[in-house]
Amino acid sequence: MNVDRNPVAELTSVSELAFELRETLGRGARLIRVESGPPLSQLTVLGHLQRKGAMSTNDLAAAERVRPQSMSLTVQALEKAGLVGRKPHPTDGRATLVQLTRKGTKTLESIFATREDWLTSVIVEQLTDDERQELHRGLALIQRIIHNRE
């Protein structure tokens, strides 16, 4: 055991690391966002629908941690753009489910392919093999942190 350890300095160091990680991930997310695609709020809804299939507006709101009224506006904008559609709920005749349209699926695929191509080329061009391995190890840690919070 290291008796010279300074818990206050260690906490500050961890806090600084957390701050830098949050800032860097945010900048990275903004950097790879495709400007011609839908806004982030709409893109995350499309992503939920792609991963989970048709969902109610209330379930989408809960998944995004926003008010159902806010999600209704987002869904309306996506519907107007032809990216989502509605279908009757299979067991509740009063409810509807939101689902991706073919256009929504193609839009997501195009956005993700563009982002992945860009990021792949940056990683290949700017990082050595050792740095890529280090990035992979860091990614596993970030994924573990996020997974434990979901």
Image: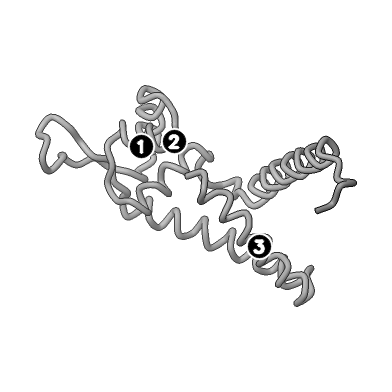
* Of labels 3 and 1, the one closer to you: 1
Earlier residue among tags 3 and 1: 1
Q: Is residue 115 above or below residue 19?
A: below
Q: Which residue is mark 3?
A: 119
Q: Is residue 1 above or below residue 85?
A: below
Q: Position of residue 121 (x, y in %)?
A: 69, 69
Q: Which residue is mark 1?
A: 60
Q: Is residue 129 above or below residue 19?
A: below
Q: Nearer the viewer, residue 46 or 101?
A: 46
Callout 1 secondary element: helix
Q: Amino acid at mark 2?
A: Glu
The number of discs equals 3
Q: Amino acid at mark 1?
A: Leu
Q: Amino acid at mark 3?
A: Leu
**Disc 3: CA contacts within 10 A as few (<14), some (14-19) or many (>=20):** some
**Disc 2: CA contacts within 10 A as few (<14), some (14-19) or many (>=20):** some
Callout 3 secondary element: helix
Q: Which residue is mark 2?
A: 64
- Could you give the CA–CA distance between mark 1 and mark 2, rounded to whole angstroms? 6 Å
Q: Position of residue 63 (x, y in %)?
A: 40, 38
Q: Nearer the viewer, residue 52 or 39?
A: 52
**Disc 1: CA contacts within 10 A as few (<14), some (14-19) or many (>=20):** many
